[in-house]
Amino acid sequence: MDQIKEKIEQLKKERRAIILAHNYQRGEVQEIADFLGDSLDLSQEAAGTEAELVIFCGVHFMAESASLLSPQKKIILPDLNAGCPLADMVTPEALKQRKRELPNAKVVCYINSSAAVKAESDICCTSANAVQVVNSLKEQRILFIPDKNLAHFVSRFTEKEIIPWEGYCITHHIVTAQEVLKARDNHPEAALIVHPECQPEVVDLADAVLSTSGMVKFAQESDYNEIIVGTEMGLVERLKRENSEKKFYLASSKFICPNMKLTTLEKVLQALESLQPEIRVEEPIRSLAKASLDKMLAIPRDR
């Protein structure tokens, strides 16, 4: 393992590459990353760096987002099979049909979607800014794609009509309120934080509903010494590493994303050696999808 890490570091320097890893990646992959974060932060980091080669340890739509913001860079996804079932639950063709049925609705597209779907949307959002993005629009009817649980969460904080797409993250959706209540019983002194991709009845139990970046901040700044984490297990590994004085518990053993776990150190090394597989979004989809991202980025961020 150490030998592989040394080779990765050597090749990274030789190729002037940067390694980005999502919070849900394996611990050993997180540890070799130059930047660790959520999907949008990683894409913005890719755009802000001078590196021309980006090894993106995440899933397909994330590498696409990096390509949208950095078309001049070579974006490599170490495992081409690392997809996102949630993103796959909406297609451009299905979205076009729904838009014809709802001509007065604005399409708000969760960043967990393909570039082709983003190209058919009016504006993107993240789990952290979804409420803010929806409330920034003057239109009253919002077709929110593709995550119905995030759509339900947003509907609690807006007077607009939210029309949800029937998609969901299989990793977050599978966890039940009963499992989370059991975690609370086991750790009665702990705060419970959950991701808004969870089912509404799980969200109802939480002390805070947060994006992964919000969870990182909560762990750093909260007075709680024990925290139950309701999202993918990779984030718990990061929180334990960065907050050694606190205790973190996974809300359910089901919180594991098989696609995020496909990336290994060996595959990162292979990606640096072969510069494959490359992810590139071609025109005209790139400019259309980027426009929906740019509209989101133009909204001042809540702090």
Image (cartoon, grey):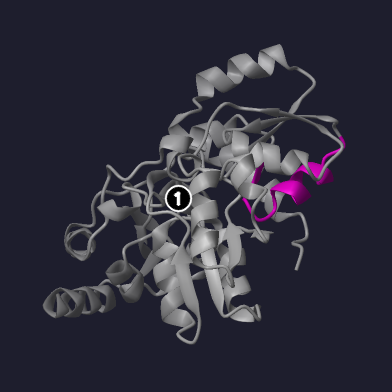
Q: Relative to 23, does residue 105 appear above or below in the rendering?
A: above
**Residue 258 shows up from this direction:** yes
User: Residue extending furthest left?
Assistant: 3
Q: Residue at x 62, y 78 (%)?
A: 224
Q: Residue 265's x, y, as percent? A: 21, 65
Magenta span includes 137: yes
User: Residue extending furthest front?
Assistant: 185
Image quadrant assignment for residue 146: top right
Q: Quadrant of the C terminus?
A: bottom right
Image quadrant assignment for residue 267: bottom left
Q: Residue at x 47, y 36 (%)?
A: 87
Q: Relative to 171, does residue 242 appear above or below in the rendering?
A: below
Locate residue 245 relative to residue 234 in the image: left or right.
Answer: right
Per the image, the residue denoted by label 1 is: 62
Q: Relative to 175, does residue 38 appear above or below in the rendering?
A: below
Q: Relative to 47, does residue 85 appear above or below in the rendering?
A: above
User: Residue extending furthest bottom?
Assistant: 245
Image quadrant assignment for residue 208: bottom right
In this orientation, which residue lies closer to the viewer: 146 or 177? 177
Q: Residue at x 43, y 72 (%)?
A: 238
Where does the magenta region start and end?
124-138
Q: Amino acid at mark 1?
A: Met
Q: Residue at x 27, y 56 (%)?
A: 263
Magenta span includes 34: no
Q: Quadrant of the N terminus?
A: bottom left
